[in-house]
């Protein structure tokens, strides 16, 4: 039976492009979570006033890709030590977050965060938010599969390209063939 994870790691175009590469991922929907107001638009979220995070909702097969492995990739594919920022993307909507759906996901998230912190993968303290998923709203259709549709767009080639190269180097055993 498939499970669902909701993760925020900066721009959802980047995060979607990374997780699309993993075997066991069945579907990904970019969207917004845990803010004020229903069905926010990209423009509203970008102001930072709605409090929503840019996230992806990942439907995955846990027998092929365990939740803890999904989170290990998460901690490698972005900088979880910068508060409300990923590279040049600034604002609360770009926060690092794991939005759990149940107590088991919460426990695994805490365990993986702690083991990542102890591994010294990142030189600075991890500031990733671990919080219950309160709401999820799908993003506008033009955000879906953005990298796949726009690989030579300057943002995609300069920001997403290196993330995919890092993924291939660090987690090749989890990639789709």
Image (cartoon, grey):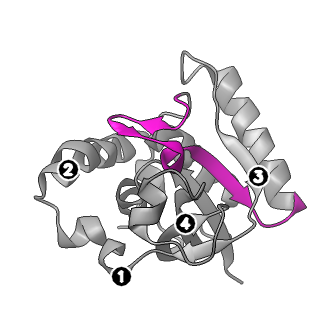
**Among numbered discs 2 and 1, the one appearing first in the sequence:** 1
Residue 63 magenta:
no
**Among numbered discs 1 and 3, the one appearing first in the sequence:** 3
**Among numbered discs 2 and 3, the one appearing first in the sequence:** 3
User: Which tag is nearer the camera, tag 4 or tag 2?
Assistant: 4
Give the number of the disc on residue 6: none
- Disc 3 and disc 4: Cα gap in Å? 14 Å
Q: Are marks 1 and 4 in contact (CB under 8 Å)?
A: no
Q: Which residue is mark 4?
A: 32
Which residue is located at x 47 percent, y 68 percent?
23
Seen in the picture, residue 15 relative to 167 is either above or below; the reply is below
Q: Which residue is mark 3?
A: 131
- Disc 1 and disc 3: Cα gap in Å? 26 Å
Seen in the picture, residue 43 relative to 159 is either above or below; the reply is below
Which residue is located at x 60 percent, y 54 percent?
51
Q: Quadrant of residue 86?
A: top left
Q: Which residue is mark 2?
A: 155
Where disc 1 sits, the SS reads helix
Q: Which residue is mark 1?
A: 141
Where disc 2 sits, the SS reads helix
Q: Are marks 2 and 1 in contact (CB under 8 Å)?
A: no
Q: Are marks 2 and 3 in contact (CB under 8 Å)?
A: no
């Amino acid at each position: 039976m498939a499970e669902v994870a909701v993760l925020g790691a900066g721009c959802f175009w980047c995060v979607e492009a990374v997780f699309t590469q993993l075997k066991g991922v069945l579907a990904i929907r970019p969207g917004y979570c845990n803010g004020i107001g229903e069905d926010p638009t990209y423009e509203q979220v970008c102001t930072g006033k709605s409090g929503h995070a840019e996230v992806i909702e990942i439907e995955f097969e846990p027998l092929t890709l365990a939740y803890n492995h999904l989170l290990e990739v998460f901690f490698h594919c972005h900088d979880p030590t910068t508060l409300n920022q990923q590279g040049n993307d600034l604002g609360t909507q770009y926060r690092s977050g794991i939005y759990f759906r149940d107590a088991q996901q919460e426990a695994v998230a805490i365990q993986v965060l702690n083991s990542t912190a102890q591994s010294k993968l990142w030189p600075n303290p991890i500031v990733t938010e671990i919080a219950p998923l309160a709401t999820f709203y799908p993003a506008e259709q033009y955000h879906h599969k953005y990298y796949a549709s726009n690989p030579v767009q300057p943002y995609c080639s300069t920001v997403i390209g290196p993330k995919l190269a890092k993924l291939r180097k660090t987690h090749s055993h989890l990639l789709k063939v």
